[in-house]
Image (cartoon, grey):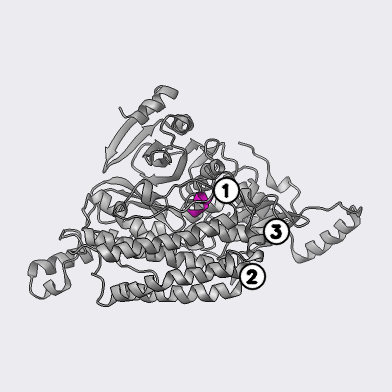
Amino acid sequence: MSTTDPRTENFPLAAESREATLAALREQRALTPTERVIASVEAYTPQEAAERTLANEMLADTRPGVRAPLLINLGPNHPSTHGVLRLIVELDGEVVKEVTPVIGYLHTGIEKQCENKTWWQSVTLVTRMDYLAPFANIKAYTMSVEKLLEMEVPARAQWIRVLLAELNRIASHLVWLGTSGLELGAMSVFFYCYRERDNLLDLFEMVSGERMNHRYFQVGGCAQDLPPGFIERLQAFIDEMPGRIDEYEALLTGNPIWKDRMKGVGVLPADELIALGVTGPTLRAAGVPHDLRKTNPYSGYEHFQFEVPTATEGDCYARYLVRVREMRESLRILQQVIDGLPEGPTIADDRKVVLPPREELAWSMEALIHHFKLVSEGFKVPAGEAYAPIESPRGEMGCYVVSEGGPKPYRVHMRDPSFVNLQATAPLCRGNYLADLIAIVATLDPVMGGVDR
Amino acid sequence: MSDVSAQIELASPGAVVAEFEHVGELTVEVQKERIVEACRALRDGPSQYVLLSDVTCADFPDEPGRFRMAYQLTSLATGARVRLRAWAGALDPQIESVTSVWPGANWMEREVYDQFGVRFNGHPDLCRILNPLDWEGHPLRRDYPIGGEEVQFSDAV
């Protein structure tokens, strides 16, 4: 371990940059590359910056073509970065030399909070991680707990989960398409996408009572059956949506500006993406047909006919095409769910884990006792560990849970695809223009709630 | 012994400490000094566990090794999964970094360092990631209080 004293390094420190230096000092080590970049970008007070500029101007090499690298701070609240993502960009002219993403601005310690809630209370917390894919979070979590409980989920509940997960995929991709369009100058796409997303949120509200952060999946199944009239509205949506996707494609797919901004931008070979842990549409756009719904079917995905869209170019445009085609495939799955939805219960019949039906509380003493025990103490989960991966709109979302046999989780960890995929920002952006960075981050589709948790 | 353990043993004899099969998931516990060799053996081996899905940790203060690392490996060829386990040690938790095998382990290990205080030797950029850089303590340790801690950032008001 190196023990360089960071104070002796050439850093005139402003108050904001002391964080990094303090951390290094406390642990008696040199600044790491990330800390060094953060310290450099924050190292000066306005007065010091003015003095430095003056000094630099006097020293500057003014020959044409000679330029010093420029560090700029994009974010944490930049309109083009989806959320509170901060990117420290080192520029040479207009070309990106290096990008250092700085995250954690939305960190709320959900994993820690879960350890102090019961298993069923934690469902509420995990939903809030990736806020554009709440059904994916909750599905990964409930699946991992069900794995530890070795619990069978009824077929109807599995199919309803597939239905909502696919609706969620469309909703998430619509937000992605709309905001990416906005960031790249295609304003009207945003309005169209949000119009359809609003229909989806209405459907979610019908099912779960909430437009986001649903608590609809429970350990063992779904909280309720689908409400009356839902299937008809869903059918209307499925009938309408392909035409809408055609509209978006008419606006974008052949649009020369859209193609100019996206084609050939942000390419990495598939093996490098895999080494970085990148999954989801980003990996599929580079030619790897890895989709957990096909490779490790869960929740009854083996019953459905659908394609896994892939592309070979691996650029931003390929990611766009893959996501648009994924929306169409999701619609195909939705139609199959409607056509073949099995009858039966929507939640497992296990009174030690699952709340008894509401109406039973009126006449059954035993149901009332079970209800009371489950709500006050929670259910116990056998000791062990389990990892349940699912295909979220952004890639592999996995939930790792550890139980010590008690009513509270010992450890809950979410492998969030946004967090892992965001690591690819720097290798994707190096050597591209600054404007391309916006397109690259947009097509990586990170959701900061999931990144920071 | 499973194929996975056999592959690790082939590349690094004596590395496997134990293996467990629970709820259909295979966990192979390896010596912490051999974690990089074990990972490399599985990545380059016949089952091609080329994707490192996740690196995380759980804190067991009563265990001699205390910090239990969990590496989730995925084979893109077969869809098979395996979890590697290693104990990082109680007093001075340290383990070799697997960033030389998968560059994607970078942020995952930074997160474990940030939340648990496990140091990863050979990591190119081991600093905090989710908490502020000068945060004191490691929040996901079991002895870190949840509530009652002083208000942070009060000087910013």
Point out residue A120 in the picture as x, y percentages from the top left corner.
28, 62
Q: CA distance from mark 2 to mark 3?
A: 15 Å
Residue B95 appears in the rendering: yes
Viewport quadrant of the N terminus of chain A = top right
The local secondary structure at tag 2 comes to: loop
Q: Amino acid at mark 1?
A: Cys
Compared with A178, B42 (above or below) is above
Q: Which mark is residue A417?
A: none
The local secondary structure at tag 1 comes to: loop
- The residue labelled by disc 1 is B127
Instruction: Identify the residue shown where x is 31% and y is 32%.
Output: B19
Q: Which residues are magenta?
A: A281-285
Q: CA distance from mark 3 to mark 1?
A: 26 Å
Q: Are marks 1 and 2 in contact (CB under 8 Å)?
A: no
Residue A102 appears in the rendering: no
Q: Are marks 3 and 1 in contact (CB under 8 Å)?
A: no
Point out residue A106 in the picture as x, y percentages from the top left corner.
51, 63
- Taken as a whole, is the magenta stretch helix, strand or loop? helix
Position of A368 with respect to A185 (left or right) is left
Q: Amino acid at mark 3?
A: Leu
- The residue labelled by disc 3 is A434
* Mark earlier in primary sequence (2, 3): 2
Q: Chain of mark 2?
A: A
Q: Chain of mark 1?
A: B
Q: Are marks 2 and 3 in contact (CB under 8 Å)?
A: no
Q: CA distance from mark 1 to mark 2?
A: 37 Å
Compared with B152, A310 (above or below) is above
